[in-house]
Image (cartoon, grey):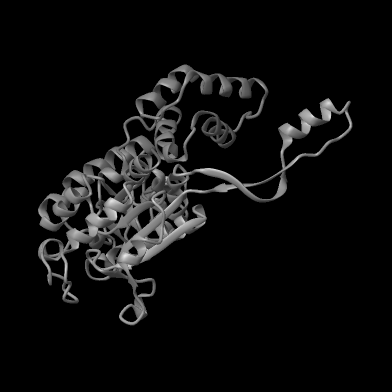
Amino acid sequence: MLVDFFYTLRKAQVPVSIKELLTLLEALENHLAFASWDDFYLLARTCLVKDEKYFDRFDLAFGYYFKGLAELPDPFDNVVPEQWLESDFIKNLTDEEKAEIEKLGGLDKLMETLAKRFEEQKKRHAGGSKWIGTGGTSPFGHSGYNPEGVRIGGESKHKRAVKVWEKRQFRDLDDSVELGTRNLKVALRKLRKFARTGAADELDLDDTIRSTANNAGLLDLKMVPERHNAAKVLLFFDVGGSMDPYIRQCEQLFSAARTEFKHLEYFYFHNCVYERVWKDNKRRWNEHIDTFDLLHTYGRDYRVIFVGDAAMAPYEVSERYGSVEHRNPEPGSVWMQRILDTWDKAIWLNPSHPRYWDYTASTQMIKNIMDNKMYPLTLEGLEDGIRYLSK
């Protein structure tokens, strides 16, 4: 059975190997999970999944193979319009009316019927017994009553839903979704250059064992300085204007970067880097930093990360006085090139979807200046960018 499950995981593009499968079999032989689906699920995931970004794919494959969900549609293949789920009508039912409502006949039948509703429904419904909506006795929607339904949106009232149409616990760890602080840290950890400096206050277990053995069994403790990430990063954030919708993502990136990198310097700019940047957006007109000073302050071993949607008037990149905020004596492209000439390892993280990049002239200009080292701000995009910086 587990061999077939192994191939199901491979089909779901979970990179599992024979070694992980043998580890799971050994764990089962030692009764680490017995007579409990939850215990087996956790044990299997622990043994078979090496990277948490694959948790969501594992969940889908597990449900597909063990819980009879082979024919069920992925909830995220269909999007229910929000207006269908606006709860402005609640139907109150008597106990007799509730008892008369018939079940559809199990989960398979329920999900098969829901798939048909997606195909047939064209508008919002409320208080009915058939369509996706609110109130009423339909099995699909929320704020109504049905002894066996699928809650879509809203909050649980009667605790009767057999399936909840919401994001799974680990959905945000897949490659294609926007980042959160936790999985963002996972990606940033790949840009690590470990070093040991400072006081020797951490036990070196291997050297302690070796020294104790050479000392005829008498304990000989060996200490080393704490190991830390010595990678050096300059982080430039585009702020204001078209970047306002991405504030939350930038905050998460900033939080994760400050946690992961001991040697981190950050700066702000608007649309494109010019002759000055700043660290305080509220005081940026009074307290700024000359970009020339940056070029002569930080060593060439720093890595540079720009974060911005690169959406602006093309003149802001190519022309003097092209900035929307001030009369820049030199084009943004000149300053970008100076930065790239100083630090040869640099990437641009773009929070907008790549399908929009080709429709914005300035995005293409920035991408060309960066020698195509522009990556989407998704887990996969960040990993690709970090992989380049770590070479």
Q: Quadrant of residue 288?
A: bottom left
Residue 141 appears in the picture as rendered: yes
Of residues 202 and 135, the one nearer the viewer is 202
Outermost residue to the bottom? 286
Question: Up-down: is 382 above or below 281?
Answer: above
Q: Residue at x 46, y 28 (%)?
A: 66
Of residues 357 and 390, the one nearer the viewer is 390
Q: Residue at x 64, y 20 (%)?
A: 29
Question: Up-down: is 16 above or below 313?
Answer: above
Is the C terminus in the top left, top right, bottom left or bottom right quadrant? top left
Q: Quadrant of residue 98?
A: bottom left
Residue 280 image point, x, y percent: 38, 75
Q: Residue at x 27, y 57 (%)?
A: 133
Q: Is residue 356 left or right of residue 347?
A: left
Residue 176 image point, x, y percent: 31, 44
Residue 231 image point, x, y percent: 47, 48
Q: How many marks?
A: 0
Q: Residue at x 60, y 33 (%)?
A: 36
Residue 263 image point, x, y percent: 49, 56
Residue 163 appears in the picture as rendered: no
